Image (spheres, helix red, strand yellow):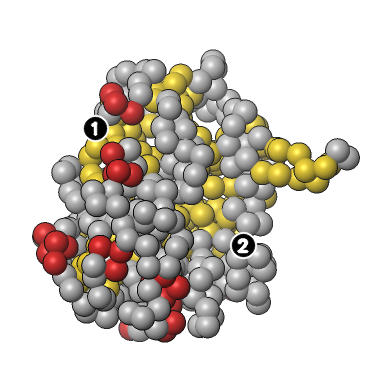
Amino acid sequence: MSTTYAAGRSGPLLATLALAFLTAVPGSAQARCDDTTGLTLPDGFCAELVAEVPGARHITVAPNGDIFVAVRNTVRRGASGRERVPGGVVALRDTDGDGHADVQERFGDDGGTGIWLDGEWLYFAPDDRVLRYHIPPGSLRPDGPAEVIVSGLPAGTSHSAKSIVVADGWVYVNIGGPSNACQAQARTQGSPGLDPCPQLERRGGIWRFSTARTNQTQDDGERFATGLRNVVALGWNAGTGSLFGVQHGRDSLHELFPDLFTEEQRVEKPSEEFVLIERGDDFGWPYCYHDPETGRKVLAPEYGGDGHEVGRCADKKMPLVGFPAHWAPNGLTFYHGDQFPPEYRGGAFIAFHGSWNRAPAPQAGYNVVFQPMDGDRPAGDWVVFADGFAGENVSPGGARHRPSGVAVGPDGSLYVSDDRGGAIFRIRWAGR
């Protein structure tokens, strides 16, 4: 069982990292950075707007620097009313080296979230399937139709977005649970949870499928790990060959059980869990959640818990880190580039989409966090690396940008996608 580490919101690490960077390169490189994005970054870093892609979700970057963006379906107002705008994949290229993509190519006729480039194969995940396109080296478009790796995945209800990782001959797929805690009556005060939870048969975990087969169904795959409510932020640590995720914790403790939980407790509980995902793991959802106050997994009130009892949760796998409640982790990548200073190498960058339900406290998240790592273990407290995405109105409807995906480019730059404003940002050390 993993150890739970206390979360750190700020502190000496950020100052140490910034100081190391400023002293590593002679002169003030920050003066050479024309950053007009409005983002707040450590000294020595800058951001630039690469492109605007409405509906951008996850991103992946090719060895030549081309960017492939997963785009969700959107809706616009047309002459005949509200019209569906199909998503797909948008490929971006900067042909003149000015940092801005001047070429865009679009393909696919359905939107999705997950995207992953594995050699010449681009994997893309709409809500109910995983597709694969062959992309010749140097091309922005596939040279043929998509292959279907797996279809018929559960979708159509909440938490239907499919995030993916492709590694070692497998496609790992997040299939989120469609409820808060598998209640008998959803969103009903005091409703008990179904026990056993039938949703775990098809959802609430990570499934994996062979890359050597096409036209698979869910039954052809393996339930690799279970008890995970929704792991939109799914990532692979290439330095250790390990799968990680950050899951969306449950909601509504106070609303559903006002006699057990105060409004303040609902704001701060439960944790968004950063987890190492290994074959056969059970993280406890919907029966359990991680309490940041005690650092333990405790029994959910739908299953007889009172906010303190551990019970059947004693043998569930613990998170490596508990992040603040309701920040909504949506993207995860590990840094193995050489542009950032050594302190960042091997660490995790996590894109938080931002909360909607922390009232009466201010909404929060809407940022990119850095978690230092030593192999597969945390190596210190996390820090907010990039902030200011939301702007002055930090709320789902008022935010300018909401981070959705993160990826590292071949030059070591960090790319961040935004599904609110459609921005694709590049964050770099100003001297490179």
Q: Amino acid at mark 2?
A: His
Marks 2 and 1, Cα distance to the nearest angstrom? 36 Å
Residue 185 in sight from this viewpoint: yes
Where does residue 153 sit, x and y in percent of width and height? 41, 32
Where does residue 123 sit, x and y in percent of width and height? 44, 31
Q: Dot 2: few (<14), some (14–19), or many (≥20) neighbours within 10 Å?
A: many
Q: Quadrant of residue 74?
A: top right
From the viewer's perspective, is the residue at label 2 or at label 1 nearer? 1
Q: Nearer the viewer, residue 259 or 138?
A: 259
Outermost residue, top direction? 144
Outermost residue, right direction? 79
Could you say which disc has been placed on residue 401 in the image? Answer: 2
Q: Residue at x 51, y 54 (%)?
A: 404
Residue 29 in sight from this viewpoint: no
| Residue that label 1 marks | 222
Compared across the picture, whether 241 is left or right of 401 comes to left
Where does residue 283 sit, x and y in percent of width and height? 22, 55
Element assignment for label 1? strand
Q: Work out whether mark 2 precedes mark 1 in sequence or the reverse, and give the earlier one.
A: 1
Q: Residue at x 66, y 35 (%)?
A: 86
From the viewer's perspective, is residue 166 above or below residue 238?
above
Q: Residue at x 44, y 56 (%)?
A: 186
Q: Amino acid at mark 1?
A: Glu
